[in-house]
Image: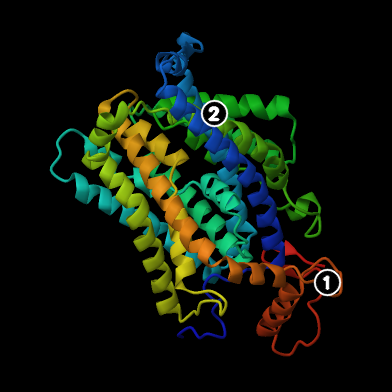
Amino acid sequence: MPSTASNVPPVLSRGSWAEASRIAGVLRKETVGGVLLLIAAAAALVWANSPWSAAYETLRDTRVGPESLHLDLTLGTWAADGLLAIFFFVAGLELKREFVAGDLRDPRRAALPVAAAVGGMAVPALFFVLFNLGRDDGALSGWAIPSATDIAFALAVLAVISTHLPTALRTFLLTLAVVDDLLAIIVIAIFYTSGFALTPLLLSLIPLAVFGFLVQKRIRSWWLLLPLAAVTWVLMHESGVHATVAGVLLAFTVPVVRSDAAGGPDAGPGLAEHFEHRIRPLSAGIAVPVFAFFSAGVTVGGLSGLGASVTDSVALGIAVGLVAGKVIGITAATWLVARFTRAQLDENLGWPDVVGLALLGGIGFTVSLLITELAFGLGSETYDHAKVGILIGTVVAAALATVILRSRNRRYRQMYEEERVDRNADGVPDVYQTEMVQETAEHDPDWKGTPPPGRIVGGSAEG
């Protein structure tokens, strides 16, 4: 039966109040982390191009850790493999929460961010490949570099330009980034595994299973869970699969909602919310900025060095992929979803808003830098050129997004104010109550009145 406008959510809808309020809290924390990321990256760039650049490289390449366990890693590698495992743990919690109890558990709502994320990864990768066809020096191994979106960096840009981005656009941006993280994890696990060893991988399943058993029983004792997580990480590292994958797998074992055995349907959220509340500040405020500090410090070498980097096909492929590839991929995927589901854009939004968000999606930094290290290794000339391409693409995408979104800020401000009106002072803005009534009526044509107490809206109990 073909979809109709009456039963298809509008493109870029604001979603439920429960989801909107949760996302607002997440974005506030990520915005602070994004500002710290910008400061750390800027400090690294300045230091790496100063007369004391040798000291930066010495610090980054200092080895620490037990050699007997093959963990005598450089500080830069510890940041990429260790600290980013924390980042991917939080990403895994967010991902599971979205698809288990969030708006994305509804296939109709999930269709747009999933399609946009796929388009936003495939088209930039295609641009990179087109720029580097014919090279026989392993350049094509960096095909996934321009595919990633850095939500913290994007939110820092929004904070700097002070735009009142309405809930629908903020929700779309975060859910797009969440799905993008999932695809990046899959790409890293499949395409950037080296020296694969089956035995450590199988052994890593043992502490992973024990960790999962404990969190399912709502045991949150750090002295039990942290050693299990660490052993899982070490064994994953030994297997050749990138150790950050361990963070995602650990997160997937954490329950999002309590089971009936743990207290019934009204028992409340699972441990995922508790862990996310505790660990997200550590990820956004420490793990990602420290990684950015050790990874963003590329020595440009003056104008001549910069010229050599920007004319290299690797840097060009990354920069064009992040800007043009993301815009084309995300916008085209959004148009196709609207076209084939007969969904309409929100009456207050237009395609320039989609383009602006797509440009924010072109801000690739954290995961792009990680994939660069996996593809080219530290210290190579191609590695340095790739980092220059990431920086240029990110800056250009941010600048263009700023121009478009600032030009729309008057409309955004009006939508933002409308979403804050709560005439009956019950804590739920009026626009969401109207939509809750409409949604309940669609599911139950014979029902009239207000949403029943405790009704699940967008994965969270309302009432």
Above or below, 436 against 106 in this view is: below
Above or below, 59 against 416 in this view is: above
Sequence order check: which comes first, mark 2 or mark 1? Answer: 2
The label number, if any, that marks residue 390 in the structure image: none
In the image, what residue type sits under mark 2?
Val
> CB of mark 2 within 8 Å of CB of mark 1?
no
Local secondary structure at mark 2: helix
Q: Which is more toward the observer, 332 or 257?
A: 332
Q: Return the residue at label 2.
A: 290
Q: Position of residue 121 (x, y in %)?
A: 37, 53
Q: Is residue 148 left or right of residue 285?
A: left
Cα distance in 3D space between marks 2 and 1: 46 Å
The label number, if any, that marks residue 453 in the structure image: 1
Q: Is residue 257 left or right of residue 183?
A: right
For the view shown, which residue lies furthest in the bottom direction? 446
Q: Residue at x 69, y 82 (%)?
A: 438
Above or below, 24 against 5 in this view is: above
Q: Is residue 252 visible?
A: no
Q: Position of residue 450 (x, y in %)?
A: 80, 80
Local secondary structure at mark 1: loop
